[in-house]
Image (cartoon, coloured by chain):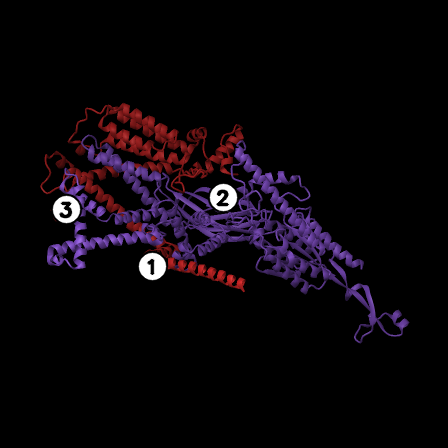
Chain colours: A purple, B red
């Protein structure tokens, strides 16, 4: 509450008051009077600020509206600007003379117009607002947490920060596109093409003749082929082809590997964009579209359909899938805390203050027995105490019961005599260390101290060790880390409803804490940089478990299929290598049932095209500045600042090493892609990269081909 | 458009006007020295504060010059002007110290100061003292407000300002028209109240032995006497005890009132947090020990399982 300016002002005025009132009042009373006046003014400001803080700031109310296309919407379209209106009402009878309001905007958005911050004074009963325009470039989820309000008095002596929490989430649906995959600008209903049906060589109600067969009772008379019946002298019935729509099933990979990258620019987002365009374009042709999302654990399928509700459902699922975040397994604990703590401070300032979320020094003290060598210190301490007790007992025995010490044949007597001798020698030694010129009290204190120190030096060392061992916890990184962790743990315990039980569990149990922090970060849509490679240099996000899941989903789709269908696999399969077996088997089954398979592989932005081997170096060099967490071949080995130190021979070596590693990884990735293409090509699946031309167009062409091929039969 | 990308310097008149408008409304723009001068002397709302501050400095100079402390007056004007124009945050403190010094040694040389036993008695409600106190109050208050306009109005988030943390000025668009007038009125009242408090502090004597330990004696009798009343405290000690007592009582009362008010207005989550934290504080040793043992047991079980698995693998290999 009290700012540093206020604190300094208070100190200076108090000092002037002390001087004026007690040192120089008989020379001049003016400094004292001025200091008293300033102090009174300061206290008046303090009182007024508290009144405002309790009466007005605590009662501020927030409302939020998101408008797109001039009306309030529950979800927004990607690629189109939308307006955010936040209003803050001061329902109290006290005005706030100066406040800074800052809306905590959603991540992965671009600000088109306006500002999220406003400097205002809020009169009593008034409403002030923040209006700004955003644009979400990619599908996903927008989360608005609330508004940070900072209030201060006009002199800057006091301040208070509150966060008006009003967490709302808005789905960002993939952009509306037309058949060419471009942003749709015309009204959809007026440009609908004819129904997208094709003929199926199964009996149905189409117009093309399929076959002739013997009449069966119940066949409609109009179906009787009279000429054929006359020739064969029995009733023959005509059978017509069936008219059915073309079906496309999209399989979208949502595994951890494709979730990596900066918000709004992940492989998953790009694939979801392609899937949305394909789905809309197919629906525009009246074809049926289904969507199956899968990851390492499970798949979720929706059957092909072409209703508007179904399309909205698909877009919603794609938006939700785009917002998925990678797990934080393998992320060091301090990184997680470093990420989560400022977020908690921002969003829950009143719950993270030391007043309500404390960390006493006793908890920071490092217990002696936390380490094995602590037991040694304890044993030494106990030995010292035991020896002291023995010495005291010997001394008291010598004074009060001297006959005991006269018995020369007893072991007890020998021990007591030895202890007494030790005790006396220590006292004499301590007395010899006392300076003669010191006052009596100082002499006494010094002698006692020396006696304690010299009586049993190992115990003294143990005490000193215990002290320095324990007090280390009060300083440095350990203190910061433990304090932050405890405060976060308390917040989590409050949110989970576990009470004080959960606090120490989160403090001690790294796994539980990491899991909860990840949940916290994901809940607030904040990404944490994750290590891409494990200790042995292996890529951690190959996600080989997704191959059987995808295969199962494909087989289920084949089992449900009623016609020759197109399966579009939007999946990162390049890294699977030898683990691709289940997918190949599923493809083989699908091809055996005359389904078509198109595999669209997302391609990392910093890996050059396999058709452009010369571009490897330039593309990879341009990708040096990639965001952390993104799948980047240079990210593992390159060091920050390496570019600026090219002149030194060591760095030259380092750079060439980085280049070499990058080229090897690129080559390896190209090889994996070629293997994938070859393996899937063998079973009749077409493989392409997501940035290879226009995948949407290709899918639509394939659908047309599917339609036309059947009509040619 | 980030605050860093907006540069307040521009040459075109329209752009300048737009820039001025932006400066008036956006408090996160870092000001250059040139823009600061522009704001101080051209923005009408801020200019009023600047005029008030310079007037106060001039008044301090005149009063000190009239008392023979023209050097001190000049020094205060120089420091105060530097504080206003160069956003020197320590200027009010220096002005106070310099003023204190020159009130004792008007010529500036630390010699010739003589104590006056009537100073406390006659030092109340003197017109030039009232004017000087008012001038100092006006200067200090306006200096802090001007700092808020051109430098920093709200304390930074951490203990020190982060490199990338934008400034938070108070833009002139939020200055109300009655603000300066209200400030002057409040300061005038404070000056009068300050005199009264000083009068009370010097008019009461503490008699620890009495049934009611306070006695109103007025200023005239107290400071002309040669020795303290029997059983009474010395004058300086009395002032000190009264001052501490008044201050402590005031703070205690305010804390009680505002503390209760805060409890009443406390949101449920904050209350729950206090309960959880208190519960933890009382039981942290036991809970800490339990969790330590639990983790130790888990680690031990893991090690044993690994050893068993290794043993099983070895046995399988032998077979």
> Viewer-proximal residue, A234 or A427?
A427
Residue wearing tag 2: A116
Please tell me which residue lies in front, A622 or A561. A622
Nearest to the observer: residue A281 or residue A688: A688
For the point 63% across and 46% down, the residue is A668
Q: Is residue B94 above or below residue A121?
A: above
Badge 2 and badge 1 both on one subunit: no
- For the residues labelled 1 and 3, the Cα–Cα distance comes to 51 Å
Give the chain of mark 1: B
Q: Chain of mark 2?
A: A
Q: Secondary structure beneath disc 1?
A: helix
Secondary structure category for the residue under label 3:
loop
Q: Which mark is on residue B78? A: none
Task: Quadrant for the N terminus of chain A, please.
Answer: top left
User: Can residue A72 be spotted in the picture?
Assistant: no
Question: Would residue B97 be seen by someone viewing this image from the given angle?
Answer: yes
Query: How many neighbours does mark 1 have within 10 angstroms: few (below 14), some (14-19), or many (20 or more)?
Result: few
The picture places residue B216, in percent across and down from the top left corner, at 15, 42
Q: Looking at the image, is A493 positioned above or below residue A463?
A: below
- The 10 Å Cα crowd at callout 3, few under 14, some 14 to 19, many 20 or more, is few
Q: Label 1, on which residue?
A: B286
- Tag 2 secondary structure: loop
Query: Farthest residue toward the left?
Result: B230
Q: Position of residue B4 (x, y in %)?
A: 49, 36
Query: Where does residue A496 sit, x and y in percent of width and height?
Result: 43, 59
Q: Which mark is residue B213?
A: 3
Q: CA distance from mark 2 to mark 1?
A: 47 Å
């Amino acid at each position: 509450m009290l700012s540093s300016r206020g604190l300094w002002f208070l100190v200076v005025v108090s000092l002037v008051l002390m001087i004026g009132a007690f040192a120089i009042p008989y020379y001049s009373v003016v400094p004292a009077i001025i200091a008293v006046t300033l102090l009174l003014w300061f206290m008046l400001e303090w009182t007024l600020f508290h009144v405002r803080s309790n009466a007005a700031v605590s009662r501020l109310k927030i409302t939020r509206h998101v408008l797109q296309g001039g009306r309030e919407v529950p979800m927004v379209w990607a690629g189109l600007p939308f307006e955010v209106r936040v209003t803050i009402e001061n329902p109290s009878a006290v005005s706030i003379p100066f406040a800074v309001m800052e809306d905590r905007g959603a991540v992965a958005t671009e600000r088109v117009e306006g500002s999220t911050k406003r400097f205002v004074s809020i009169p009593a009963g008034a409403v002030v607002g923040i209006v700004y325009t955003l644009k979400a470039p990619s599908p996903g989820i927008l989360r608005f947490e609330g508004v940070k309000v900072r209030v201060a008095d006009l002199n800057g002596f006091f301040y208070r920060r509150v966060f008006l929490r009003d967490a709302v989430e808005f789905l960002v649906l993939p952009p509306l596109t037309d058949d060419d995959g471009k942003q749709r600008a015309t009204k959809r209903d007026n440009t609908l093409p004819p129904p997208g049906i094709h003929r199926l060589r199964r009996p149905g109600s189409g117009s093309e003749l399929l076959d002739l067969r013997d009449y069966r009772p119940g066949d409609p008379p109009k179906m009787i082929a009279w000429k054929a019946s006359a020739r064969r002298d029995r009733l023959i019935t005509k059978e017509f082809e069936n008219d059915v729509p073309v079906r496309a099933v999209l399989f979208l990979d949502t595994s951890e590997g494709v979730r990596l990258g900066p918000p709004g620019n992940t492989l998953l987002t790009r694939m979801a964009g392609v899937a949305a365009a394909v789905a809309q374009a197919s629906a525009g042709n009246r074809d049926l579209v289904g969507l199956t999302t899968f990851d390492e654990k499970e798949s979720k399928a929706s059957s092909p359909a072409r209703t508007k509700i179904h399309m909205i459902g698909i877009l919603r699922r794609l938006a939700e899938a785009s917002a998925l975040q990678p797990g934080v397994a393998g992320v060091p604990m301090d990184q997680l805390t470093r990420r989560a703590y400022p977020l908690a401070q921002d969003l829950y300032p009143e719950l993270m203050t030391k007043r309500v979320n404390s960390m006493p020094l006793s908890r920071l003290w490092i217990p002696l027995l936390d380490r094995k060598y602590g037991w040694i210190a304890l044993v030494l301490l106990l030995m010292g105490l035991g020896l002291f007790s023995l010495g005291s007992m010997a001394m008291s025995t010598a004074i009060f019961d001297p006959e005991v010490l006269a018995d020369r044949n007893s072991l007890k007597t020998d021990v007591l005599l030895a202890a007494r001798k030790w005790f006396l020698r220590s006292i004499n030694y301590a007395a010899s260390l006392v300076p003669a010129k010191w006052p009596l009290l100082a002499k006494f204190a010094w002698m006692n101290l020396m006696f304690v120190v010299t009586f049993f030096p190992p115990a003294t060392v143990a005490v000193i060790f215990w002290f320095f061992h324990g007090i280390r916890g009060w300083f440095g990184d350990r203190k910061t880390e433990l304090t932050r962790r405890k405060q976060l743990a308390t917040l989590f315990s409050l949110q989970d409803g576990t009470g004080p039980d959960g606090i120490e569990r989160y403090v001690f149990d790294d796994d539980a804490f990491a899991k909860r922090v990840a949940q916290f970060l994901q809940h607030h849509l904040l990404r944490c940089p994750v290590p891409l490679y494990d200790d042995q240099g292996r890529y951690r996000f190959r996600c080989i478990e997704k191959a059987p899941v995808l295969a199962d989903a494909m087989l289920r789709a084949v089992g449900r299929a009623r016609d020759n269908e197109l399966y579009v696999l939007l999946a990162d399969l390049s890294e699977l290598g030898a683990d691709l077996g289940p997918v190949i088997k599923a493809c083989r089954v699908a091809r055996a049932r005359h389904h078509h398979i198109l595999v669209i592989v997302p391609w990392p932005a910093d890996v050059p095209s396999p058709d452009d081997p010369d571009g490897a170096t330039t593309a990879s060099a341009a990708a040096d500045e990639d965001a952390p967490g993104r799948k980047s071949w240079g990210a593992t080995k390159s060091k920050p600042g390496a570019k600026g130190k090219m002149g030194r021979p060591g760095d030259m070596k380092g750079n060439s090493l980085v280049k070499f590693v990058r080229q090897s990884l690129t080559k390896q990735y190209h090889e994996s892609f070629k293997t994938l293409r070859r393996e899937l090509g063998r079973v009749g699946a077409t493989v392409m990269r997501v940035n290879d031309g226009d995948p949407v167009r290709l899918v639509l062409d394939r659908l047309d081909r599917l339609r036309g091929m059947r009509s040619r039969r | 458009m980030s605050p860093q990308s907006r540069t307040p310097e521009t040459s075109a008149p329209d752009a300048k006007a737009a820039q001025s408008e932006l400066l008036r409304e956006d408090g996160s723009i870092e000001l250059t020295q040139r823009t600061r001068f522009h704001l101080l002397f051209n923005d009408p709302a801020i200019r009023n504060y600047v005029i008030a501050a310079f007037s106060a400095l001039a008044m301090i100079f005149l009063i000190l010059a009239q008392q023979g402390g023209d050097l001190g007056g000049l020094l205060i004007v120089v420091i105060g002007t530097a504080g206003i124009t160069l956003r020197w945050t320590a200027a009010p403190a220096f002005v106070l110290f310099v003023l204190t010094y020159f009130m004792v040694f008007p010529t500036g040389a630390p010699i010739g100061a003589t104590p006056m036993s009537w100073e406390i008695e006659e030092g109340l409600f003197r017109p030039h003292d009232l004017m000087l106190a008012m001038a100092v109050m006006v200067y200090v208050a306006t200096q802090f407000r001007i700092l808020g306009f051109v430098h920093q109005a709200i304390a930074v988030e951490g203990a020190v300002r982060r490199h990338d943390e934008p400034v938070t000025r108070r833009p002139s668009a939020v200055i109300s028209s009655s603000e300066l007038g209200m400030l002057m009125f409040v300061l005038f009242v404070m000056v009068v109240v300050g005199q009264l408090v000083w009068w009370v502090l010097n008019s009461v004597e503490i008699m620890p032995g009495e049934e009611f330990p306070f006695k109103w004696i007025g200023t005239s009798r107290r400071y002309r006497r040669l020795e303290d009343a029997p059983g009474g405290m010395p004058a300086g000690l009395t002032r000190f005890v009264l001052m501490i007592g008044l201050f402590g009582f005031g703070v205690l009362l305010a804390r009680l009132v505002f503390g209760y008010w805060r409890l009443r207005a406390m949101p449920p989550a904050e209350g729950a947090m206090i309960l959880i934290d208190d519960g933890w504080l009382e039981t942290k040793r036991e809970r800490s020990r339990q969790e330590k043992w639990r983790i130790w047991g888990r680690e031990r079980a893991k090690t044993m399982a690994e050893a068993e698995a290794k043993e099983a693998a070895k046995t399988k290999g032998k077979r």
